[in-house]
Image (spheres, rainbow, N blue to C red):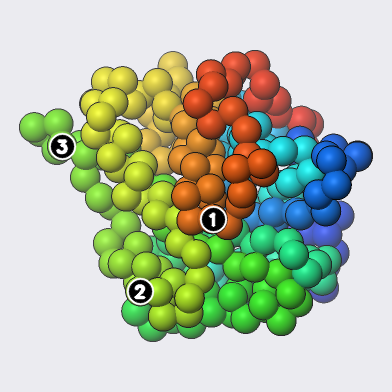
C-alpha cells in the first residue's frame, strides 16, 4: 500500500519514542538536554526482532553518550538523501528538533542506486543539493547539522586490501562540509582503516554473517558497537561534543546490551 507524504510524516513522528534509545528522564548535573537526531540509512537504523542479529550502529551510539544526550534514531532501511526527503522524513525531524540539538546526517549507500530514480543522486550535484536541505533546515531551527561519510562495506581484493565502495560520494560530502563550515565525521575513512586492520576473516565477525546469509553491508552487534565508537570519538575530536558528554570510549561494551524490540503493528 502506498502512503502519501502526510501519512509517512505522521508515521515517522509516531516512531520517535522507540528511537530514543538510552534516553534518561533526568538531566545529568546541570547540563541542558541536547538530543542527537540521526538521519540515515539501514547501516544506522533501528532494527527489530525479526531482523536480529542485524544491528544498526545508531542502536549502539547511546552507549557512548551521557544520558542527557539521547539519540532519536530516524534512520530507515533503503533510504537515500533524496528519498528520505521525498517521503517527508526530514520534515518529521524538523518539526520537533530544537535549538541546541544536533542533526547527524549519513547518506550515500542508496544514493548510489543508479537504476532507481527515486533514490539515485549524482555525487557533485544532486547529492550535495539534497544534503544542503538538511543543513539549511537544521540551522533554521537553531540546531547544529553534522555530516558523516558513509561507513564502508566489507570488500577486499585478492591480496587482502580493504577496498572503497562508495565512489565519489565521500569526497563530495567532504567538499560540502568544508564549503558550508559543517563538522564532518569521516566514518568512511575510519571504517575502511578498521576493516584493513582486522583483515579478511576477522571482519566477518563484525558484519551480518550467519548460517544462511553473508551480508557485507550490515552489521551484527560487535560491528554496530565498533562503528558507533568511531562516531562518538569523531563527535569528540571535532568538538561537536565535549569530553563530559561522552563515555566508555575505551571500554568493552557487552553485546548483550543490544536489544531488538518487536516491530510496531
Please tell me how many numbered marks the rendered image carries: 3
Q: Residue at x 39, y 54 (%)?
A: 186
Q: Is 123 displayed left or right of 78 in the figure?
A: left
Q: Is residue 164 left or right of residue 230?
A: left
Q: Please tell me which residue lies in front, 137 or 237.
A: 237
Q: Position of residue 33 (x, y in %)?
A: 81, 52
Q: Is residue 250 above or below residue 10?
A: above
Spatial CA distance of label 3 from label 1 is: 32 Å
Q: Which mark is residue 239?
A: 1
Image disc number at residue 143: none
SS class, disc 1: loop
Name the residue at 35% across, 45% down: 190
Q: Which residue is mark 3?
A: 161
262 to 93, vertically: above or below: above
Instruction: Give the quadrant of residue 185.
Output: bottom left
Q: Which mark is residue 175?
A: 2
Q: Which secondary structure, mark 3?
A: loop
Percent from the top left, x then y, of residue 44?
56, 46
Q: Is any atom of residue 216 visible in this view? A: yes
Residue drawn at 47 percent across, 31 percent down:
226
Residue 173 spot, x, y in % from top left:
40, 69
Amino acid at each position: 500500500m502506498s502512503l502519501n507524504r502526510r501519512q509517512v510524516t505522521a508515521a515517522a513522528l509516531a516512531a520517535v519514542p522507540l528511537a530514543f534509545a538510552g534516553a534518561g528522564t533526568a538531566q545529568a548535573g546541570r547540563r541542558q538536554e541536547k538530543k542527537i537526531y540521526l538521519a540515515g540509512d539501514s547501516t544506522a537504523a533501528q532494527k527489530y526482532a525479526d531482523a536480529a542479529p542485524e544491528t544498526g550502529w545508531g542502536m549502539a551510539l547511546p552507549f557512548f553518550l551521557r544520558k542527557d544526550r539521547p539519540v532519536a534514531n530516524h534512520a530507515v532501511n533503503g533510504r537515500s538523501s533524496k528519498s528520505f526527503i521525498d517521503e517527508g522524513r526530514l520534515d518529521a525531524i524538523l518539526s520537533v528538533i530544537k535549538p541546541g540539538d544536533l542533526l547527524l546526517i549519513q547518506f550515500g549507500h542508496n544514493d548510489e542506486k543508479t537504476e532507481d530514480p527515486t533514490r539515485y543522486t549524482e555525487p557533485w550535484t544532486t547529492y550535495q543539493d539534497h544534503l544542503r536541505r538538511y543543513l539549511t533546515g537544521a540551522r533554521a531551527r537553531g540546531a547544529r547539522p553534522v555530516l558523516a561519510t558513509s561507513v564502508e562495506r566489507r570488500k577486499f581484493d585478492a591480496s587482502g586490501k580493504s577496498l572503497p565502495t562508495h565512489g565519489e560520494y565521500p569526497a563530495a560530502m567532504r567538499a560540502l562540509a568544508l564549503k558550508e563550515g559543517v563538522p564532518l565525521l569521516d566514518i568512511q575513512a575510519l571504517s575502511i582503516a578498521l576493516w584493513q586492520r582486522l583483515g579478511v576473516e576477522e571482519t566477518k565477525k563484525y558484519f551480518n554473517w550467519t548460517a544462511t546469509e553473508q551480508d557485507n553491508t550490515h552489521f551484527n552487534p560487535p560491528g554496530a558497537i565498533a562503528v558507533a565508537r568511531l562516531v562518538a570519538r569523531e563527535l569528540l575530536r571535532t568538538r561537536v561534543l565535549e569530553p563530559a558528554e561522552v563515555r566508555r570510549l575505551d571500554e568493552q561494551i557487552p553485546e548483550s546490551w543490544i536489544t531488538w524490540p518487536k516491530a510496531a503493528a
